[in-house]
Amino acid sequence: MDDMKDLVLNYVIKEYMEDGDEEITYDTPLISSGYVDSFSMVSLLVFLENKFTIKIPPEKATPEAFDNVNSIVALVKQYLK
């Protein structure tokens, strides 16, 4: 599970963080702190679905589910076979 957490965390850092942003952790609020916006959330969803060969229903792809790495990983694990 830590590998998945690291993969998601590294993706978020690479794609959405800017130089000078504070360091983020698995528990850092991503959406409510403004690091990830709604457009970025959609690209993150596409990344997760492609990477893990899953389909997350739109009603499950909520800002709450995407607000930190731990909740993202928990969501992904629900749809892994």
Image (spheres, helix red, strand yellow):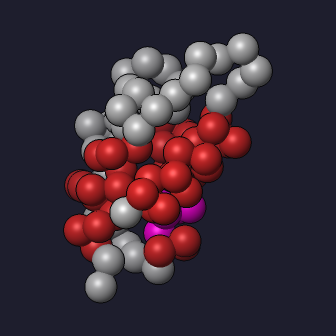
Res 62 → quadrant:
top left
Side of 33 relative to 12 (left or right)? left
Please name the predominant secondary structure of the magenta segment in the image. Answer: helix
Residue 19 lies in the magenta-colored region: no
Res 40 → quadrant:
top right
User: Which contiguous range is marked in magenta?
Assistant: 45-49
> Where 8 falls versus 81 (above or below)?
above
Q: Position of residue 8 (x, y in %)?
A: 51, 52
Q: Please state which of residues 38 and 68 is positioned toward the viewer in this rendering.
A: 68
Kindly tell me whether residue 37 is visible in this rendering.
no
Q: Residue at x 61, y 49 (%)?
A: 11
Side of 18 relative to 48 (left or right)? right
Q: Residue at x 61, y 47 (%)?
A: 10
Q: Residue at x 64, y 17 (%)?
A: 21
Side of 25 relative to 70 (left or right)? right
Kindly tell me whether residue 67 is visible in this rendering.
yes
> Where 17 falls versus 57 (above or below)?
above
Res 23 → quadrant:
top right
> Where 8 falls versus 34 (above or below)?
below
Q: Position of residue 42 (x, y in %)?
A: 50, 49
Q: Position of residue 73 (x, y in %)?
A: 35, 55
Q: Residue at x 30, y 85 (%)?
A: 81
Q: Position of residue 61 (x, y in %)?
A: 32, 52
